[in-house]
Amino acid sequence: MAKPGKNGSSKKCSEAVAYREHTAALAEAGHGFHRRGWVLGTGGNFSAVLTRAPLRLAITASGVDKGALTAEEFLEIDQEARVLRGTGKPSAEALLHLVLVGKRDAGAVLHTHSVWNTILSEVFAHQGGVAITGYEMLKGLRGVATHEHREWLPILENSQDIPALARRLEAALERHPGSHGFLLRGHGLYTWGRDINEARRHVEILEFLLEVTGRTRAVAGSAAAASGAR
């Protein structure tokens, strides 16, 4: 039988390894998103679940450059967003990450600020969301088996009152249980997954679909204008 001290030491070692692996993977994701123009400067934030009982998240510190993100620029927080490890403070949006972990059983949450997701969050704000259907790339989303799937991305009004925003997010998730992400108006995209790899794939799929939606709308508008000018 192992001594209690050894068990405690082994647990701490395992937690330290998990923290290093998760923060390294999130930093790598940030570099890739930066290269594609989805998280420029200090925009965006990323998190991953370390343990669920008790709940612990690794999350980006506030104000860090995502293009030069390192594993050292993450924090470990608890279910109240209190910092347990690392220096600096978590984004106020940590509360949104905690909502998604609780309501969607997410293992990772990724938030991007691309040009297209920002534009479309404004264009479709009056509709309360963006509907996307008919594209083969939809099958890259968890549980989607056909291009006929209709993905609805709710759009929430942005706010600096994060507790109130978190409550509105909870309500939106309840109204749209099948959604794989949501948009904050004039702000960006949130998506999630069972783990970092799935969340990363969802970012790639949704960013592609949002860009296609935006470009298709622009082309159709140009064609209509050209036709009217004849």
Image (tube, helix red, strand yellow):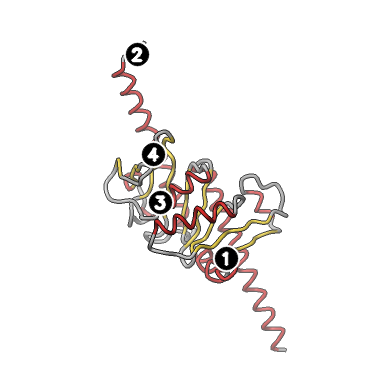
Task: Please tell me whether mark 1 sits on a helix, a strand or a loop.
Answer: loop
Answer with mark 1 or mark 4, whichever residue precedes in sequence.
4
- Compare marks 4 and 2 and give the one earlier in the sequence: 2
Q: Secondary structure at mark 4?
A: strand
Frontmost of labels 3 and 4 is 3
Q: Position of residue 124 (x, y in %)?
A: 58, 69
Sooner in the amino-acid sequence: mark 1 or mark 3: 3
Q: Is residue 119 left or right of residue 4?
A: right
Q: Which mark is residue 128?
A: 1
Residue density around tag 1, few if under 14, some if 14–19, many if 20 or more, within 10 Å: some
Q: Which mark is residue 95?
A: 3
On screen, residue 160 above or below 14:
below
Q: Is residue 107 left or right of residue 224?
A: left
Q: Residue at x 69, y 78 (%)?
A: 223
Which label number is shown at residue 56? 4
- Which mark is first along the chain, 3 or 2? 2
Q: CA distance from mark 3 to mark 4?
A: 13 Å
Q: Nearer the N terminus, badge 3 or badge 4?
A: 4
Question: Identity of the amino acid at label 3?
Answer: Leu
Looking at the image, residue 177 lies above or below residue 228: above
Q: Position of residue 13 (x, y in %)?
A: 34, 28
Residue 54: which quarter of the image? top left
For the view shown, which residue lies furthest in the top direction? 1
Q: Residue at x 55, y 58 (%)?
A: 207
Q: Residue at x 36, y 51 (%)?
A: 69
Give the residue type at disc 1.
Gly
